[in-house]
């Protein structure tokens, strides 16, 4: 039988004789020393094991670095890549208020000379205030429906012509039985009208505040169903919010005050020649545009062609159904486009650059088919020698002081066009597209862009133009005449053309920054 000895210090008042045959507890001291030696040995083993783990970790990191050093550096030392930050900004815009661009974005305010910036910023703020007055509407006010309300009212689609009395549909009260019922209607931009009815007290007919009181819910609802609204003033496109109250319950519903627009219809005629006009602008030389015209006539002998020319040494482009319009020299790229589109008498126009040429795969009929099948489309882009020619725009309005943020993402698209999986909705396309003439003219081309410009048209049309692009090399492709003549499909500015664009983006578009993703 073994006995464990533990060394203990003598307690107060205890002597060696009190401990029997081992007064100084030598056996316990021996056991303590053995335990200490065991602990020292264990600590040494732990140190050795830790050292081995560190060496192993260093070896693994070294092997990973040798295999792919770029990936390791990006993961370990540069976790926030610029591209990742931009992608996050594009897919998850910040909430209302000031917007932001990434570090690599163009900040327009910093690129305008200080001597011009102060006056330009003041004029910009004044013009933006005017713009908001023109475009703001009460109909943008969020409306919240309270639960268990006894009030019945129209929540959407109540449209009235200006200065025209119109019955408010579905106006009513669904309350429990009580001795008396009183409701009121209040408006800031309109007047209420109703007839008198026995059993119902009416106050304020012909005014902005209308009150109706009755002891009969049936009679009250009969009169409510006859209440009419009329705007106080004429406006072609306005809105109002009407307050409808009963006791502690209140509801607000929108009124759209709108002058109906006159339809603008185009006769498509019997063939493609009455559907589409081909439009182009001569940039410098005449030989490319002659090649373009010859290629068009090979496949479309009678289709109308509009050519805009601003050369100083002029040459006439002759041919059947060709119209050539001369401009003063150096009027600019967008001024030429504007002139060309205003001379289009067909429903659609096909814009092409003068260094393009038609081929067997350039089938205008396919463009028209897709546009007619999707009447909401305004612009439909094709393929330029097999290249992707589209982009998407994310625009954040920002605040009133600094302005908005624009993010342009190339080779990016939204959802597909119904029944045409090869086509997708986008924000803009390159210089080969079919446009709906009236929709394009409504946006217009800024004549201040007098050198290269294409994305700017789609930036100006953002929110009003419905744009799509089709990747169909069998029928919606156009060729370049010569690689030496090839230019950027989007006509992005070169270094000498950026200064005036900074002013345009900053002032006209009220932008703080822009970036290309």
Image (tube, rainbow, N blue to C red):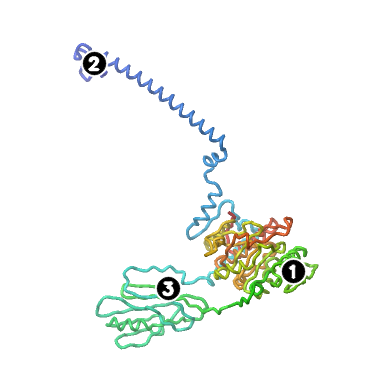
Which one is nearer the viewer's eye here, 28 or 464? 464
Which residue is located at x 19 percent, y 12 percent? 20
Give the mark toward the camera: 1 or 2. 1
Question: Which tag, 1 or 3, sits closer to the chain's start?
Answer: 3
SS class, disc 2: loop
- Point out the tag, 3 or 2, that comes first from the N-terminus: 2
Residue 341: image location, x then y, percent: 66, 71
Which residue is nearer to you in this view: 475 or 292? Answer: 475
> Which quarter of the figure has residue 62?
top right
Q: Earlier in the sequence, mark 1 or mark 2?
A: 2
Distance between the alpha carbons at the discs numbered 3 and 2? 95 Å
Q: Residue at x 61, y 76 (%)?
A: 268
Q: Is residue 366 above or below residue 106?
A: below
The Cα atoms of the two marked residues, 1 and 2, are separated by 115 Å
Q: Which residue is mark 2?
A: 2
Disc 3 is placed on an element classified as loop
Q: Residue at x 55, y 69 (%)?
A: 373
Residue 365 as seen in the image, left or right of residue 213:
right
User: Residue 306 at x, y = what percent?
Assistant: 70, 71
- Image disc number at residue 309: 1
The picture places residue 511, in percent across and down from the top left corner, at 58, 61
Q: Is residue 30 left or right of residue 169?
A: left
State the image quarter where residue 203 is shown: bottom left
Which image quarter is the N terminus in? top left
């Amino acid at each position: 039988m073994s006995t464990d000895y533990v060394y203990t210090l003598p307690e107060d008042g205890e002597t060696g004789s009190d401990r029997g045959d081992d007064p100084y507890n030598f056996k316990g001291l021996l056991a303590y020393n053995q335990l200490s030696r065991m602990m020292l040995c264990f600590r040494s083993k732990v140190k050795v094991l830790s050292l081995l783990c560190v060496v192993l970790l260093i070896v693994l990191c070294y092997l990973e670095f040798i295999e792919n050093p770029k990936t390791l550096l990006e993961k370990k030392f540069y976790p926030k890549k610029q591209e990742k930050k931009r992608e996050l900004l594009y897919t998850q815009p910040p909430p209302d208020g000031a917007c932001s661009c990434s570090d690599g974005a163009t900040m327009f305010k910093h690129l305008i000379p200080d001597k011009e910036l102060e006056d330009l910023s003041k004029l910009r703020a004044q013009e933006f205030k005017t713009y908001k007055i023109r475009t703001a509407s009460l109909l943008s006010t969020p409306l919240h429906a309270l639960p268990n309300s006894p009030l019945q009212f129209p929540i959407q689609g109540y449209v009235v012509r200006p200065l025209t009395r119109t019955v408010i549909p579905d106006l009513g009260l669904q309350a429990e039985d009580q001795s008396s019922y009183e409701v009121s209607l209040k408006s800031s931009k309109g007047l209420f009208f109703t007839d008198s009815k026995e059993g119902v007290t009416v106050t304020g007919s012909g005014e902005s505040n209308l009150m109706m009181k009755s002891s009969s819910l049936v009679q009250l609802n009969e009169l409510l169903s006859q209440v009419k609204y009329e705007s106080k003033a004429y406006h072609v496109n306005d809105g109002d919010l009407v307050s409808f109250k009963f006791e502690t319950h209140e509801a607000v519903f929108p009124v759209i005050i709108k002058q109906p627009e006159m339809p603008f219809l185009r006769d498509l005629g019997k063939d493609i020649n009455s559907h589409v006009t081909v439009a182009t602008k001569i940039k410098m030389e005449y030989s490319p545009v002659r090649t373009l015209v010859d290629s068009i006539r090979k496949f479309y002998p009678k289709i109308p062609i509009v050519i805009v020319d601003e050369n100083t040494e002029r040459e006439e482009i002759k041919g059947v159904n060709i119209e050539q319009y001369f401009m003063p020299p150096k009027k600019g790229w967008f001024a030429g486009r504007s002139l060309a589109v205003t001379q289009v008498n067909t429903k659609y126009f096909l814009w092409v650059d003068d260094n393009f040429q038609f081929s067997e795969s350039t089938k205008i009929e396919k463009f028209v088919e897709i546009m007619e099948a999707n009447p909401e489309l305004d612009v439909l882009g094709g393929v330029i020698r097999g290249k992707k020619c589209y982009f998407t725009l994310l625009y954040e309005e920002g605040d009133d002081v600094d302005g908005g943020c624009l993010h342009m993402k190339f080779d990016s698209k939204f959802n597909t066009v119904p029944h045409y999986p090869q086509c997708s909705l986008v924000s803009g396309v390159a210089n080969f597209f079919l446009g709906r003439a009236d929709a394009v003219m409504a946006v217009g081309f800024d004549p201040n862009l007098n050198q290269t410009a294409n994305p700017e048209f789609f930036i100006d049309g953002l929110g009003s133009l419905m744009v799509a692009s089709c990747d169909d090399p069998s029928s919606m492709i156009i060729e370049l005449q010569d690689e030496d003549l090839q230019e950027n499909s989007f006509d992005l500015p070169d270094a000498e053309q950026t200064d005036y664009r900074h002013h345009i983006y900053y002032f006209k578009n009220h932008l703080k920054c822009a970036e290309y993703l």
